[in-house]
Structure formats: C-alpha cells, structure tokens
Image (cartoon, coloured by chain):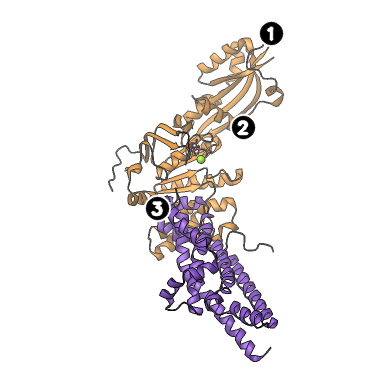
Amino acid sequence: MSANLINLLIEATLQTLYMVAISGAIGTLFGLPIGVYLAVSQRGELLSSPWVNKVLGLIVNATRSVPFIILVVAIIPFTRLIAGTSIGTSAAIVPLTIAAVPFIARLVENAIREVDSGLIEAARAMGATPLQIIRKVLIPEALPGITLGLTLALVSLIGYSAMVGAVGGEGLGDLGIRYGYQRFMPEVMLAVVVILIVLVQLVQSLGEGLARLVDKRAPRNRGR
Amino acid sequence: MADVETSGAAITFDKLGKSFEKKGSGQVMALEDVNLDVAPGTITGIIGRSGAGKSTLLRMVNGLEQPTSGTVTVAGHDVGRAGAAELRRIRRDVGMIFQHFNLLSSRTVYGNVALPLEIAGVPGAEIKRRVNDLIGRVGLEQFSNRYPAELSGGQKQRVGIARALATQPKVLLSDEATSALDPETTQTVLKLLADINRDLGLTILLITHEMAVVRDIASHVAVIDGGKIVEAGSTYEVFAAPQHPTTRSFLSGITGITLPSFIAGKLQAERPQGDSQEVIRITFAGQHATDPMLAKLTSELGIPVNILAGAIEEIGPHPFGNLLVSVEATRGAEARAYLERHELLTEVLGYVG
Ligand SMILES: Nc1ncnc2c1ncn2[C@@H]1O[C@H](COP(=O)(O)OP(=O)(O)OP(=O)(O)O)[C@@H](O)[C@H]1O
Ligand SMILES: [Mg+2]
C-alpha cells in the first residue's frame, strides 16, 4: 500500500473520530437531560406529567423510526441552516447528532428507570427536592447503566458515520466506498474494515471498563 | 412554623383514613378511623399482618402518603396539609429506616450518611464532623470508606440508622427494619435503637410483624388489623391482658411455647364424649406470675394439673409467663374461674380424649 493511501487512511480515521466524538458529545448534552426527563415525568414518578411525557416520547420514537440514510437526506435544509453547508464532514455531524439524541435519551431513560424506587423513597423521606433526587441519587446510581448506554451509542455512531459519504461527509466509510468499491481497491476496503473493527473494539472495551469502574454494586474483589 | 405542642404527643393520628384507587375496581380502604397518640421519647411498636396497613400508616407520618381523611400531627405540624417546602422541613425532623436499607450503592458508608446533610445544605466542615460522629455511634469507624455491597445486612442497617439520625430528627420511623436480618443481628440492631432512644430521647415508631421485636424494645404497642387499630396500650398491659383475637394470636407466636406435637395432633375444638382433658393456656402477669398458682389449684380445689409447656420471661421490669396445662374436662370451668379470680388469663385451646 502506498504512503499516499496510508495518509488517506489516517486522515479518514481522524475524520471518523471527529464526527463520532462531536456528535456523541452534543448528543449526550441533549440526550441525557431528555432521557432523565422521560424517566421522571412518567405517571406517578418524581415529576409526573404524563402528557408531556407522551408527546416527548412520540417525538423520540418518530426520530428513531426514520432510517438514518433517509434522515440525512430529509434534513438537508436544516443541516444547511446549522452548518452553513449541506456537504462535508462538519455538515455530516448534524444528522449524526440528530440521530444520536433520541437514541441516547432512550438508553439513559432505561438506565434511570432501573434505579431502585426505594432509593427515591429514602431521598424523599430525607426532604430532598426532585432536582436533588435527580442529581444526587438517580444519575449517580444509574451511572454504570448510562456508561454502557453511551458506549452502545458511540458504537452505533461509528456505523452511522460510514453512511454520511452519501452527502459528502468523509471518513472511513466514504473512503471504503470510493476507493475500495468504486476504484476496486480491495486492500483499501480491507484496511477500512479492519480499522473500523479495531475502533469499535476499543470503544467497547473502554466503555465496559469505565462502567465497571463506576459500578459499586458488586464487591470490589469479585472473581478473586 | 407554628410550634403548638398542646397535646404533648410527638405524633398524633386523629380519625385518620386512607383509601387507594384500585385500577378498574373502585377503592381499597387501607386505613380507617385511626386514632393514636405517640408520647415523646417512647418506642411504640405497630404490629399487624401483611396488608393490615402498617406501612401506609407510617408513611403518612413523613408525608410519603397523603391522608384521605383525618390528620397526622408531628411535633405540632399537620403533615397532610403542609406545602412542599414545609413538608421537606418536617421530613428533616423525621428520620426513616427501611427493611431493605435503601442505601445508595454508588456512595460509601460516609457518603450515604452525608447525603441527608448535603440535601439540607449543611456546610462541608459541619458535615464531616457530624458524619464521623454518627459513624462512631453506630460502630462502623472501620467501614467508613466501604461501599454498601461490601457490608453485611446488620452493618447496612447501621448505616441506615446513622443516615436517619444525620439531621438530628425528633422522630425515627422504622419499617420492618429487622425483617431482613437473622435473629442475632436483629438483637444488635434493636439494642442500637434502644440505646439511641435512651441517649437522644428520640421518639421511635416501629413497624413489625414479630411480637418478639415489640417485647424486646417497645414500651407501647398498637395492633392493627384490616386498617383499624384494634388494640393499643403499654406493651406490658397488652401482653398481660390481650383483648383482641389478633393480639392473642400474635402473642401465642412469641411466647416460645407450643403444644407438644403428640397433643397438638389430637386436639379437638369440641369436647368429646366420655373422659377427656381440657387444654388451657394460662398467661401469668404481674406479681402472680411468680406465685405457685397451680400448686394452690391442686391443694385448695383438689384439681390435678398436667403441665404441658411453659416459659417465663420479662417485659421491661415485669415478669410475664405462659403455661400450657391440661385438667380434667369436667373440672375445667371451675379451674379457670379460680385462676381468673387470681388475675391470671386463661384461654381454652381445645380438648383431648
Ligand atoms: N400505592 C398503593 N396503591 C394501592 N393500594 C395500596 C398501595 N399501598 C398500599 N395499598 C394497599 O393498602 C393496604 C395496606 O398496605 P400496607 O403496605 O400498608 O400493608 P402492611 O401492613 O405494611 O403490609 P406488609 O406487612 O405486607 O408490608 C393493602 O391492601 C395494600 O394492597
Ligand atoms: Mg409494609
């Protein structure tokens, strides 16, 4: 493989990482509070407001039902509004983020709902406000689950990011299609696939390690 | 905050009622016309069967549940009518411990005890001082940096107790706090509660379905059955002269005496034809507990008595005993009347042919 190709691969990897990191970060910034709110606004919960919950849930579901490749094309006007352009790596971050937010929201919601209701009761009995319960009980207790959820979201984003070549986004997926498929260079395709596998493996191991670190539910010396 | 401690009670339940909406099929009456005064500094046990309404009653003391009728007053505050902010203040004066401890798995022992203080906005230095103090009081100095998953059940409940005491409450609520513990650990936790009650003058309201817990630490007891308080009073009085069948059945469970199986198997509710023996439970209380009443029964009336089982224990300073005996069925009524005259409680358990 030529030095030129290797440079292309490095560049594409960085572009992929850039897209995944930014969309993952912004996705978490919005997805986390939405997820928490979805969990605590259910009927009978801390900030019970079933109607808002239902509407928000519908929006989240609707966004998640749209296949990613269609979402990318469908929101092109919105992408142009945000990024100033509808093509390129930075523009690709917009649909990636839009896809990440509801996904992360649902994962966070599930993690929060796993928290033992007895803990909420104990905090209420201490005189905690709903906000204090969210900050000091729900989020810390759900942290292992949230960490695993975010890991899953990042892995999915790596996959999604391979599709944004369709709108001029760059990165590994785009490189694989243009060189590996269109110019028929199977070695490039292979390199792309290997890099993607390594990336996913890294994110997964890192996420699981982090989740284990924050999980105090089992004895520390487990397995020894 | 109006502090009107007119009645002098720490907690007053007044004509308290609570019903729950049942999905589809109307309402469940969980509590009905509950009236009870809990005197400050006492340990009051609330005992009842599963579903009797114990937890519901307790949860109304700190407003986790709202009454549908009547009032709960804690240190002069009407809990049911308190607004959100006032309710939070009341809750800082009412600690609570739970059957399953409800400790945060993400926080160490120290962090768990500190939580109510963080919530109350206590400054950091003060939190540190108080938490270390509390951890010492419950004997967990060495475990300060452990996580709940690394503790035994008894240790977890100690953390729960320290946490409940953090905001220096006047009242402590305990919902089956020892039900998940083995008998030995139960004793140490009960002892800790009794010490706290004595040292801090805390009013403790505790729920249990074990009479033994009531016997061991409660000065007062209320028996709840089907959402109503069917009997209440000092533990000794209730133990010595239980009125309600529910109380009696709870009591028979703890005296530690049961009929020998060879008799229990033959016991009949109706008196059979011909020769038979009447099996009687005698409850001894007060000074008579130590009198040789059975010997007198034989010497004065000439009724021979077979002793089947028995035990004498103490409730606070009072001796308290239970005996299972049998006498000739034809003379049963006579024997019971004699014993009742001497302030012993009798109950016919059945007959054996
Ligand atoms: N949130 C609720 N919604 C509907 N019904 C309820 C609710 N909480 C309690 N109940 C009902 O109220 C009654 C009393 O329940 P409660 O939990 O107070 O009983 P308990 O005496 O504490 O029983 P246990 O010993 O099993 O804990 C039960 O019939 C129960 O089904
Ligand atoms: Mg209960």
Q: Earlier in the sequence, mark 2 or mark 1?
A: 2
Q: Is residue B15 left or right of residue B275?
A: left
Is B231 placed above or below A116 here?
above
Q: Quadrant of the C terminus of chain B?
A: top right
- Asked whether disc 2 touches disc 3, contact meaning CB atoms under 8 Å apart, the reply is no
Task: Give SS at disc 1.
Answer: loop
Residue type at mark 2 is Gly
Q: Are marks 3 and 1 on the same chain?
A: no
The chain letter of the purple chain reads A
Q: Residue furthest front?
A: A182
What residue does disc 3 label? A127
Q: Is disc 1's CB within 8 Å of ligand 1?
A: no
Residue type at mark 1 is Gly
What residue does disc 1 label? B274
Q: Position of residue B322 (x, y in %)?
A: 58, 27
Q: Residue at x 33, y 38 (%)?
A: B8
The answer to whether residue B114 shows anywhere in this view is: no
Q: Residue furthest top?
A: B274
What residue does disc 2 label? B256
Task: Give SS at disc 2.
Answer: loop
10 Å crowding of disc 1: few (<14), some (14-19), many (20+): few
Q: Residue at x 50, y 80 (%)?
A: A88
The chain letter of the orange chain reads B
Q: Position of residue B145 (x, y in %)?
A: 54, 63
- Indicate the quadrant where residue A208 lies: bottom right
- The chain to which mark 3 is attached is A
Residue type at mark 3 is Gly
- Spatial CA distance of label 2 from label 1 is 32 Å
Task: Give SS at disc 3.
Answer: loop
Q: Position of residue A195 (x, y in %)?
A: 64, 78
